[in-house]
Image: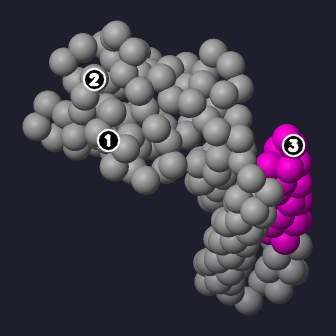
Amino acid sequence: MDPVATKTKEKLQKVLDVLKDDLATIRTGRATPALVENIIVLAYGGSAKLKVMELATIAAPDNQTIVLTPFDASVIHDLQKGIEAANAGLNPVIDSNVIRIKIPPLSQERREELIKAMKHKLENGKVMVRQVRHEMIEDMKKDYDGREDDISRLTKEIQKLVDETDKTIEEWGKQKEQELLQI
């Protein structure tokens, strides 16, 4: 595979990774650790995302509950405050040495709002893909100045990679929409 195509593939994979993380933040009415792992928590004199600080284990024992078990019981109230301050619509309750978060079912109106937000995120992902395509074609034209056959061949190869990435984004969107519409 040509170095231009390899570099394009790497950049497109980074876009997909960012988009996947972004889509994971959209609540589907089902409890998942992704709903809380990016919440910023103030603890030990600093602040960071819950996942990064590694303050607790995060589990989803059923579709309606998230359970956080702090490694250090002294930060349990910091975790609770961080989750409440995130305005994610989550209500953490301290139950002895764990925090339980019940995930309420989504209303139809809320589902439609989330689908709209999800489609916006997908469109942003497609914009990032087009930016990668534009950058790679411009870089390639500089590197292959005057070699029209190579430019044409590599442009087609880049477009093929972009089309595959767009198809993946569309599939993710359909899958996420189905999850949001499930009751």
- Which is more toward the observer, 16 or 76? 76
Q: Secondary structure at mark 3?
A: loop
Please indicate whether residue 83 sits to the left or right of residue 119 in the image: left
Residue identifier under label 1: 82
Q: Where does the image place residue 19, in percent across and percent down from the top left?
A: 64, 55
Q: Is residue 154 visible?
A: yes
Q: Which residues are magenta?
A: 157-183
Q: Nearer the viewer, residue 166 or 50?
A: 50
The prevailing secondary structure element of the residues shown in magenta is helix
* Viewer-closest of 51 and 146: 51
The residue wearing badge 2 is: 76
Q: As displayed, is residue 166 above or below residue 43?
A: below
State how far apart marks 3 and 2 are (Cα). Answer: 33 Å
**What's under tag 1, amino acid-wise?**
Gly
Q: Residue at x 51, y 49 (%)?
A: 89
Q: Residue furthest top?
A: 96
Label 1: which secondary element: helix
Q: Quadrant of residue 6?
A: bottom right
Q: CA distance from mark 1 to mark 2?
A: 10 Å
Q: Does the stretch in magenta take in 173? A: yes
91 up-or-down from 174: above or below: above
Residue 30 magenta-drawn? no
Q: Which residue is mark 3?
A: 182
Q: Residue furthest bottom?
A: 146
Mark 1 Cα shell of 10 Å, populated few (<14), some (14-19), many (≥20): many
Quarter where residue 45 is shown: top left
What amino acid does circle 3 point to?
A: Gln
- At 73% from the left and 89% from the top, the residue drawn is 146
